[in-house]
Amino acid sequence: MPRISQRAHHVPLSPFRKLSAVADQAKARGRHVYHLNIGQPDIETPPRAIEQLQQTPIKILAYSPAEGWATTRREIANYYRTYGVEVGTDDIVITTGASEALQMLFYACFDHDDEVLIPEPFYANYNGFAQIADVKVTPLPCYIEDGFALPPVDAFEKLITPRTKAILITNPSNPTGTFYSREVLEGLAGLIKKHDLYLFVDEVYRDFCYDGQTFFSALRLLGVDDHVVVVDSVSKRYSACGARVGSITTRNHGLLDSVLRYAKLRLSPPGLGQLLTEYMINLEDDYLERVVAEYDRRRKVVYRRLSAMPGVVSYLPGGAFYCFAKFPVADADHFCKWLLEEFEYEGATVMLSPGAGFYATPGRGINEVRIAYILNVDDLEAAMTCLEKALEVYPQRVDTEVKALSQQV
């Protein structure tokens, strides 16, 4: 039998999908599984936008240009203006989701063994994209005890080497929900200019900010137009994950020309997804306002329930719809699998994402999980009760270690 590549053997497993088969087996046994493992919202995609798509007379669903339809790029540029960002259609390339956007940037900006500096924990697929592109991830440690706040700029600077080409952050963060302020971004702007680096900012969750915080896009940073690249997606903003429409936005047209070389190889981004995107952006109702208010309620439920669980360390996330939690367990991978294989409470169990998959540093995150609060409040309360009961009876609970950590907070 022909051999598969060594590269394929080393692609990291997705922490939010690695237990999918185990979850399917639990469902086959009749258990209800509360999915808190993946950012698939249960909120409806805007119904009016779907109606408009259904009513669009399409005789031929043709290729779009490799960079995406000009009309779609124009609508995205108009949307950015609501955040004080002035860009044109020529500053935007449409991609097949934010994932393809990151992959194209890795291909266009990095050579073999170049380095990207990323605060950890980070979106787990960054590890995979880097592995495929033969790029080294240099992690900057952040810690749950302070809500994964970014360290000072000099902590970034100490990790920069001659091979460092970019800093990558997600704002607000997936997986931690941490919000980064204008002051934080301005500090990074000075650093990337000093060391001639790219700053990639994944802004997929920019609309989900809480407690009166004002989002500041990296595209508003002054004097670093050639350095800043923003990655975006409609997946979470409009609960349209299956549309697979993302984008790369930068005023660095040399970089965009390089990205387009890859974009032309895959011919075009999704046509129906681009049409749906135009309709969703042009919504005239309070859809986003209502969605953000709903996620705020869910955020508070999760924080309240986790705070009441003995031995659990967590925090109130400032954005997105994720948080991390440190559990009184030695191995969160084992705990998450045990939940699906051996535990049930009133006929139900919970699926979580083990935390180690969101780190590049071996050994970090082994007793942590990511929680995606994408269920309605009633289901979320039930899922939290299920989790609380599970932690009470888990055979490998390790109270003393986690209590010690809690006392340090």
Image: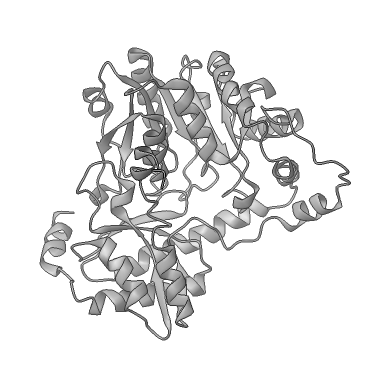
Q: How is the image coloured?
A: one colour
Residue appearing at x 36%, y 25% in the figure: 188
Q: Is residue 6 visible?
A: yes
Q: Position of residue 380 (x, y in %)?
A: 46, 70
**Residue farthest toward the bottom in the current orientation of the protein:** 346
Q: Which one is in front, 366 or 78? A: 366
Q: Is residue 192 left or right of residue 239?
A: left
Q: Position of residue 88 (x, y in %)?
A: 67, 22
Q: What is the count of numbered marks?
A: 0
Q: Is residue 253 left or right of residue 276?
A: left
Q: Is residue 301 visible?
A: no
Image quarter in which the C terminus is found? bottom left
Quadrant in the rendering for residue 316: bottom left
Residue appearing at x 35%, y 46% in the figure: 12
Q: Which one is in front, 255 or 3? A: 3
Q: Position of residue 150 (x, y in %)?
A: 30, 37
Q: Taking 17 as reference, is 80 above or below it?
A: above
Q: Taking 53 as reference, is 27 above or below it?
A: below
Q: Position of residue 117 (x, y in %)?
A: 32, 29
Residue appearing at x 26%, y 22% in the figure: 160
Q: Which one is in front, 120 or 112? A: 112
Q: Is residue 136 left or right of residue 396?
A: right
Quadrant in the rendering for residue 355: bottom left
Q: Taking 35 as reference, is 366 above or below it?
A: above
